[in-house]
Image: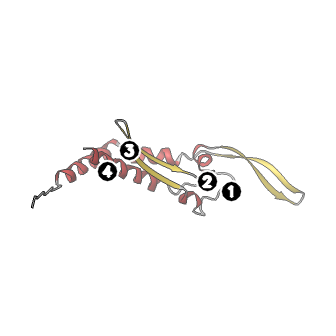
Amino acid sequence: MDTVILALVREVVQDVATRSSTPESMGGRMPVKTGQLVSSLSTRVYRTGNSTIGEVTYTAPYAGLINRGGAVIRTYNTKNGPVDKEVTHTPKSFLDAAVVEAVDMEKMNTHLRKKLQEAQNIDIKTSAR
């Protein structure tokens, strides 16, 4: 059963990663389309105690700003020299939205049934020669 749950969580984590890999930035210039955000994606599935944990994280320093929104000071070059300006970013919550979409209970039940079916079809052959 552990393998079935691990396989299911791995599948859901991959689904979240796929859905969240192309967020749009709002307000100000963010290097989203350059692929730096997508290439900073990291996924991990592990067991701790009785829980199976699936992690989807972005290591790009601006990922949290795009996901949660907030303000940042940006330096702009003007004809009078550099000017610092506060730029506000509207939250996109791309990770949260991807989790909600991927962890749909009806879909989870379908995935779990499929994984259990696959596990039941495993044929273990042993022989002692």
Q: At numbered mark 2, what does the secondary structure look like: helix, strand or loop?
A: loop
- 119 sits left or right of 57 in the view: left
Q: Counting residues from the N terminus, which is met first, the one under dot 1 or under dot 4?
A: 4
Amino acid on which the number 2 mark rests in the picture:
Ser
Q: Residue furthest bottom?
A: 34
Q: At numbered mark 3, what does the secondary structure look like: helix, strand or loop?
A: loop
**Mark in the foreground, 4 or 3:** 4
Residue of label 1? 29
Q: Can you give x and y, in whole percent of width and height, for residue 85 in the image?
A: 78, 48
Q: Going 57% across and 57% down the picture, which residue do you hit?
A: 37
Residue of label 3? 103
Q: At numbered mark 4, what does the secondary structure look like: helix, strand or loop?
A: helix
Nearest the eye: 56 or 123: 123
Contact between marks 2 and 1 (CB within 8 A): the answer is yes
> Which numbered disc covers residue 25?
2
**Mark in the foreground, 2 or 4:** 4
